[in-house]
Image (cartoon, rainbow, N blue to C red):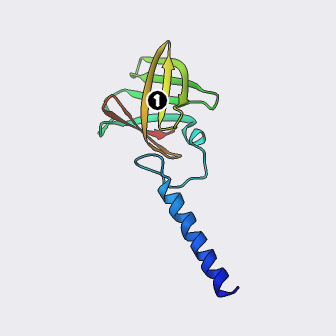
């Protein structure tokens, strides 16, 4: 390989790396992933923190996002469990998730979405989930 081709290859590699770093979609990353946003979001999530406070108060909240747009929200209070079903979709810019349950529609801002972590902001509160 001659010097000119080596310089061009190095320049192209640097531009590629800088572009991946600069197109981070959400405030808290990730900078680069091979999985689609839908692929990362799909699955079961457990709420582990609400506004930085651990969820160790005797109840749990779990959300499930399915690829086909179905959504479920389960509260477990030990001896009592309640589940709500609805639908979800990304906003057009994929910076928010719209959840609809029985005519009630809410938009949640995505702060972080990785394969194992989901952080959302809703009505001034920060919801931190971990994938089950």
Residue 53 position, x and y percent, is 29, 38
Label 1: few (<14), some (14–19) or many (≥20) C-alpha neighbours in 10 Å:
some
Asked whether 57 or 24 is in front, the reply is 24
**Residue 130 versus residue 29 in the image, above or below:** above
Residue 120 position, x and y percent, is 41, 36
Residue 6 position, x and y percent, is 64, 81
At a point 53% along the width and 55% down the height, the residue shown is: 32
Residue 107 position, x and y percent, is 44, 27
Instruction: Name the outermost residue toward the right.
Output: 1
Q: Quadrant of the N terminus?
A: bottom right
Choose top left, top right, bottom left or bottom right for residue 76. top left
Asked whether 70 or 103 is in front, the reply is 103
Instruction: Name the outermost residue toward the bottom.
Output: 2
- Horizontal side, residue 130 vs residue 52: left or right: right
**Residue 10 versus residue 123 in the image, above or below:** below
Q: Secondary structure at mark 1?
A: strand
Asked whether 131 or 24 is in front, the reply is 24
At a point 59% along the width and 76% down the height, the residue shown is: 10
At a point 47% along the width and 38% down the height, the residue shown is: 95
Asked whether 2 or 20 is in front, the reply is 2
**Residue 112 versus residue 32 in the image, above or below:** above
Q: Which residue is mark 1?
A: 62
């Amino acid at each position: 390989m001659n010097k000119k081709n080596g310089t061009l290859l190095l320049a192209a590699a640097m531009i590629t790396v800088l572009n991946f770093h600069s197109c981070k979609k959400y405030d808290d990353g990730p900078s680069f992933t091979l999985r689609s946003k839908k692929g990362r979001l799909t699955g079961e999530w457990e709420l582990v923190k609400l506004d930085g406070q651990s969820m160790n108060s005797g109840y749990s909240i779990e959300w499930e996002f399915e690829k086909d747009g179905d959504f479920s929200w389960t509260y477990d209070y030990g001896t009592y469990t309640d589940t709500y079903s609805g639908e979800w979709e990304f906003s057009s810019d994929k910076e928010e998730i719209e959840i609809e349950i029985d005519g009630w529609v809410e938009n949640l801002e995505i702060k972080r979405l990785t394969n194992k972590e989901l952080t959302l902001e809703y009505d001034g509160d920060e919801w931190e989930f971990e994938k089950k």
